[in-house]
Amino acid sequence: MCRCPRRLKPALGRAKALFLLLSGDLHATGASPADIIGEAAASGVRRVVLLSTLGVVTRPFGPTRIAMRALEDMLREPGLEWAILRPGGFASNALWWAESVRAQRVVAAPFGDVGVPIIDPADIAEVAAACLLDNRHPGAVYELTGPEAITPRQQIEAIAAALGSPVRFHELTREEAKAAMAQSMPAELADDTLGILAAPSPAELRVSPDVQRVLSRAPRPFAAWATRYVASFR
């Protein structure tokens, strides 16, 4: 994240719309995502599309979701057109498995038979583009999911089908998974992610109609994502 929003001024000078995607250091010392919105408005930006998270609704009490909800609320203040995108899990999280698939044709993950409707990031990008360019979407809040719940075991089967070779699944305990995830994300986020993977709420299992509503087509299935990214696993 840019910790000095004024540095964005040259890029914002001729912009009329902004897609705001915040990195994982939302709470880092000196981070000021709200100031980015203020700088954008001062530079003449009139429309902001924020990539938020479904977690502001389904698990609203952690620091990350509280901060994101506050940013959503700020965006709603008069003066800007806005749209908010709330995706659930990303299909691209499967790239965490790419190295072990390439090296050993094995995936180690927890809760192999618990599924959620993960979304292809390409669908998020297309919805974001529509919200930036189309005047039908200001004031909209869209929950973005894939077309169906899919388990880790089913994701691995889709990757194996794309590869044309088998991939083994090794189920991790929650403790083993947390230790692995803590190497690349804050402990709070690891706990939250594991909580969703272990016992998704009805809201986290819900397949949203919003991709269809915006793009006039169904969201892409995980198998399509796996086919596009098969080179990452080969």
Image: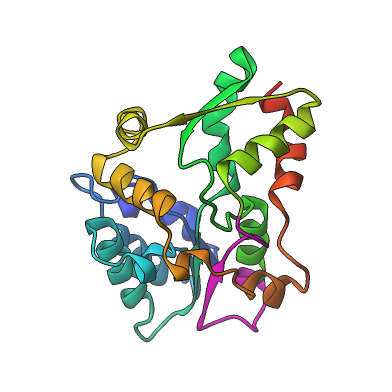
Percent coordinates x, y for residue 212 in the rendering: 71, 72
Residue 114 in the image: above or below residue 46: above
Which residue occupies the extreme right position in the image?
164
The colour scheme used to paint the residues is rainbow
Residue 8 in the image: above or below residue 58: above
Q: Nearer the viewer, residue 185 or 195?
A: 195
Q: Is residue 185 left or right of residue 128?
A: left
Residue 198 in the image: above or below residue 185: below
Could you tell me which residue is drawn at 55 percent across and 29 percent down? 97
Which residue occupies the extreme left position in the image?
29
Percent coordinates x, y for residue 203 in the rendering: 46, 70
Could you tell me which residue is drawn at 25 percent across and 40 percent down? 187
Give the magenta part as a residue range. 131-149
Percent coordinates x, y for residue 83 in the rendering: 51, 75
Q: Is residue 53 magenta?
A: no
Residue 73 in the image: above or below residue 33: below
